[in-house]
Image (cartoon, rainbow, N blue to C red):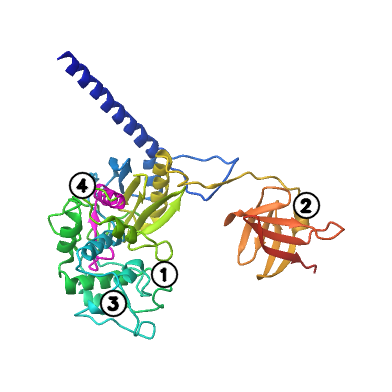
Amino acid sequence: MQNKTIYCFFIFLLLRQVTVGQTSKISRVENNLTETKELIFEDSTILKYNIIDRMKFYKIPSVSIAVINDRQIEWAKTYGYADIETKRVPTKTTLYQVASITKSVNSVGILKLVQDGKLSLTNDIRKYLKTWTFPDNELTKNKTITLKNLLSHTAGLSVHGFIGYSISDSLPTINQILDGKRPANNEAVIPIYPINEHFEYSGGGYAIIRKILDDNISPNYDSLMTAIVLEPLKMTNSTFSQPLLKKYKNYAYGTDKEMQMLKGNYYIYPEQAAGGLWSTATDIAKFVLSIQNDLRGGKNATLNKQLTQEMLTPVLNNYSLGFGIVEKGGEKYFWHEGESYGYNAMYYGSFTTGKGVVILTNAYPSNGQPFIQELLNSVATVYNWKDFYKPVKKKLVLVPDILLSKYVGDYYSENPKIKITITKNGNQLELTARRPEKMYATNLDTFFLASSPDDKCVFSASNNDGSIDTFEVIQNGKTIIKAIKKNK
């Protein structure tokens, strides 16, 4: 009995340590938000902000966040108001529009159907289109277009995204959306670039995917994706219903740029496959964990390892089949962001380290983007995502005014053929090629531009009198531009 008591006491201490550790990390994430910069000067002061302060600054009504660590959801938390008028506080089960994050979830559903032999990534999509005719033109005639093209935005199609419909608007059918016919408020989905040669982000392409599912698998997209993705992954607080069914009362109300609630609380996205998912941070975190599990070939996998790897292999522009792919600090991440009228969202998941984060807001996109980036960087810093957020640090030197004046002038390069103008503004140089940019000195003769801080801009003299007549841009130790000053 005594041994059992001691054992229980140690278990209690262990759990308490874990809880205290998590609380500490949560507090550090909440108080470690900094303005996102690609360049930091070593002598500058880096200000850190509290999450609530930044929400006020950026006009963010509410935030729902879930942090993944060691292949599990370590914590989830909400802040602010799901309804700014009634001051209703969001919970972990409050739904948010996740907009284009839908594309990732949709892709897993498509790959599941491929795995089950019901669809093919390589068949011509015209084979699947039974009640809508693909609008071929000289770019696509007699050429194969595949589901892989649609998922990776390499089909060269128009209609970047959809603006949604007010709760009082008439809603279009999927054919009206594809044809750009009223009451649809988008242009027709048509080929505008050659297939496989150009990355052109196309929500229109995902509307075609929806049409393929309607014609071949099920005319009820919501029920289909619930059955093959949401239910197996236990995403119990997610739905593709557009508009929301009445049973979903716990959702965050979308807001405009001035943080005013939208008429009808949200906009409707009947295209569904391109951006129709409502979800929670915890449910999207479950989705991220499932992909991480499938990548390892783990138990109860949704997709087999080979198909998962294909899904996450970039095709063009670091975009795979429904996922952005980025590598930082030697680790690869799959990710996606989402923007709809009144909502902004983003998730990241690592390939091998079992880390990730989901951030959802009911904020206008231009308000939400910088805030989400700051919160993402805070999580990455606190949880030691190696070199995930690593701005370039530079130490500046003061160049005497008389030396700055010697650098002023027009420099001409033959290969590439370009004119570079150096002017002096106060105690700082300014370079103009395509547009004016300030120059920062790291040595008496060496400068850099904020747009390319790793490149060196070096002034030198090629003649015996020592007058400055040469300007070079050096990248990775190699001169990529050499320009000679021409005296007026």
Q: Is residue 203 visible?
A: no
Type of the residue with mark 4: Thr
Choose the circle earlier in sequence order: 2 or 3: 3
Residue identifier under label 2: 403
* Sequence-wise first label, 1 or 2: 1
Q: Secondary structure at mark 1?
A: loop
Q: Which residue is disc 4 drawn over?
A: 93
Q: Secondary structure at mark 2?
A: helix
Distance between the Cα atoms at labels 4 and 2?
63 Å
SS for callout 4: loop
> Which residue is drawn at the image coordinates 36% and 55% (left, top)?
335
Indicate the position of residue 389 as horizontal and vertical percent values.
47, 47
Specify whether 85 is left or right of 38. Answer: left
Within 10 Å of disc 3 (Cα), the crowding (few <14, some 14-19, many 20+) is some
* Amino acid bearing label 3: Asp
**Residue 14 belongs to the span the image colors magenta:** no
Question: What residue type is disc 1 on?
Answer: Phe
Give the residue displayed 19% in from the left and 16% down from the top: 3
Q: Nearer the viewer, mark 3 or mark 4?
A: 3
Which dot marks residue 45?
none
Residue on which disc 3 sits: 124
